[in-house]
Amino acid sequence: MPEIGSRLGRSLGEVAAYMPDMPHKYRFTDIPAAPHPRVLDTCTDAIGPSSAEISARGSNYDVIADDAVLLAHRRVHASGIDQLLDDWAKADGRDHSLGGRPHAIPTHAVFVALMLLTREKKALNLTLAAHLLQHRLSPQSRDLLGIPHPHTTFTAVTPKHNKWYTNTVRAFRRAVSLMDPYPQERYTSKTYAQIQAILERHDVEREKLYKARLDEFTRRLVHMTFMSQPRWVRRASNTLDVSFDQTYIPLPNSKGYSRKNLPERVSDEQRAESLGTLSPGPVEAHAGWHARSNDNRRDFQRGELNTVAPERAGSTEYTWGLEANLAVRVDSDSPGSQRFPALIVAASLSIPNMEVAEEASRLLESASLLGLIPSVADADMQYFANARPERLLEPALKLGFTPSTEYRKDRLGIRGGAHGLLFVEGDGYCPHTPQALLTCSLDYREGRIDAPTYHRRLEERRAYRAHVKGKAKAPQDRIIKTGKRTGQSVTSLPVFVRCPAIGPSPTVTCPLREMFMGAAEKSRPHVEPETLEAEFLDKICTQHSVSINLAEMVNPAQAFDYGSKEWDEFHSHARNTIESANQQLKDPAAEALEDAARRRVRGPAAAQVMISFLIVNYNLRKIAAWLDDHARGRLPDPAKQKTLRRRDRVWANRYTKTTGSGDPTIPPRGPQATAAPEPDASLIPMRT
């Protein structure tokens, strides 16, 4: 008996439970030491592979519930992608109504199958989609999706499987071909000469059209998931704050090439005696090298040569693939309060190091179509702090988004100016502002001052900031709400500002300006110009107001004062949210976005279609989890102070701002300064 138990891997009682109808004399409890052959035969019949499992080669034949199929069908239909594909087919002259053989499987059925596979956390490959359509749908679901009923009588199994797979692949490729900006043959490895020929034949104008189609396909699906929230959840805030970033997406084929060295590789091939002496080349011509470190990443514009590539073979710094551009909804009014699910509200796929800023502006444009008022757009130093204004800042301001970002070290302090104003970290300041206040961010970043001194200087510097003149006159004006530059309103690009010593609410006093009669009597910083002669003064000191263009500032104006506690709270919340979304999407137990084997399709267009359905499933999971937490009262209460996790109490964590000693006041950026804090005496003389 021990040998039977060990071979089955179960206790005798567990094995006996599989055979309730076995005659008592053959049960394991009464079996002698030497088992009877009939016992083994009965055991095999009871737990061995069934005929259905053998026919399916171990695959799952469980029929999916009609309600689940109906729900997936409704979601695909609600997104509008079916009508979108029909319109594109007519525009390309592929109208099926003109005649031809009817399609065996409609593209709608393939999309429903992909949505069902993501719900089951299965790999998104067309083999499983074909298997689902062939075996796992009830007759009612087949009629709903318009697919044929499988014939099992007098039909060989293998040819039948092949036909379903072929028809499923055709339906998928039929849809992808309508929005593929980079068409090429992807069945075989290419020589470098063939790669060069593909790049030379590439139609840039066609790429723009089909890239817009592809992004619209993704937008429709993402928009559908956003609208699937209850209205009271969507409208928990009437404004839209987003945080966006890129994340690496591997391709099934990891062999890449360098565009910089491509002519040299072509010459080497021409000198070779035969291709048999060379190793296989890349398959995908339209991809790029993702750099792991920020220092090696670039942002090339259309028409520029993408020179990012490993310097030597086998480098672990670079990986071949694509970049997913994602924008997640965040909350600038109440960071971290979880008033609504942190959904992905815009997404696209792009080639690494190419048009990073343009992809970000397209994300903001896509997100702005959700029906909410654009508010704050948060990003890291790769975007607003790196791109030229016309590439990202101007489009963002025109859409109504106010930037929130970290600045590079070389852009801290005074960075240009206009009409006498000094541009410092997104704001215009009086030309007579004390130098220590203008350079406090750089001093803090380099460790010359500590955190309390830094925040005190930021607070003192606010008094010298130029005042925005007037109120917003139209709904399309970008209004900065309470908590974000309280009481100020600015239009999309040009803005009128005035000296901080004039107006009904002056914040400084100056011998060049007469105090407004109705101004409150309180202590204000006093400035002393180097000269009082008007001919040597700039416009900000002589005119009532001046006009500046926000897009001309080296550092973009931000929704919160850079470096302030409000800025740090929101920026940390926004960055943590987008990084958390990236991590959850790459979770092997969920969408497994980083596993190319889970979506075995070639080409950027096919990859984006698959990733779009993964994002749909991610958003639906987030909505369901949030609604469940809300019903059970598990959402955090903003009024209650969170208890630090043991990990944050013991270890330092730059995201939660903990030092490991339980003290949550670690400086938000830069090294811990060792310099002694300045005395409490103010730097600035005060007068009433």
Image (cartoon, rainbow, N blue to C red):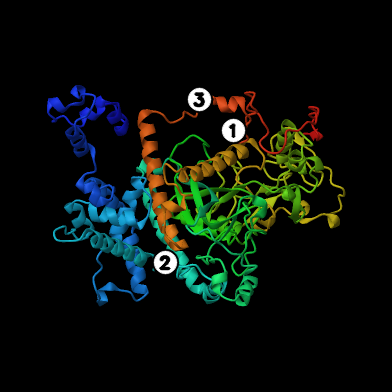
Query: In the figure, 215 relative to 480: above or below?
Result: below
Amino acid at dot 3? Lys
Q: Considering the numbered disc 2 on the image, is that residue within a helix, a strand or a loop?
A: loop
Amino acid at dot 2? Met
- Which of the marked residues, 2 or 3, is nearer the chain's N terminus? 2
Q: Which residue is mark 1?
A: 656
The answer to whether residue 214 is left or right of residue 426 is left
Q: Examine the image and state in which quarter residue 661 appears.
A: top right
Q: Residues within 10 Å of mark 2 (few under 14, many from 20)?
A: many
How far is mark 2 from mark 3, CA to CA? 49 Å
Q: Examine the image and state in which quarter residue 192 appears.
A: bottom right
How far is mark 2 from mark 1, CA to CA? 43 Å
Q: Residues within 10 Å of mark 3 (few under 14, many from 20)?
A: few
Residue depth check, mark 3 versus mark 1: number of the one nearer the observer: 1
Labelled disc at residue 179? 2
Which quadrant does the C terminus fall into? top right
Which residue is at the front of the view, 516 or 440?
A: 440
Q: Which residue is mark 3?
A: 640
Q: Considering the numbered disc 1 on the image, is that residue within a helix, a strand or a loop?
A: loop
How far is mark 3 from mark 1, CA to CA? 17 Å
For residue 291, say whether it is visible: yes
- Which of the marked residues, 2 or 1, is nearer the chain's N terminus? 2
Query: In the figure, 451 relative to 496: above or below?
Result: above
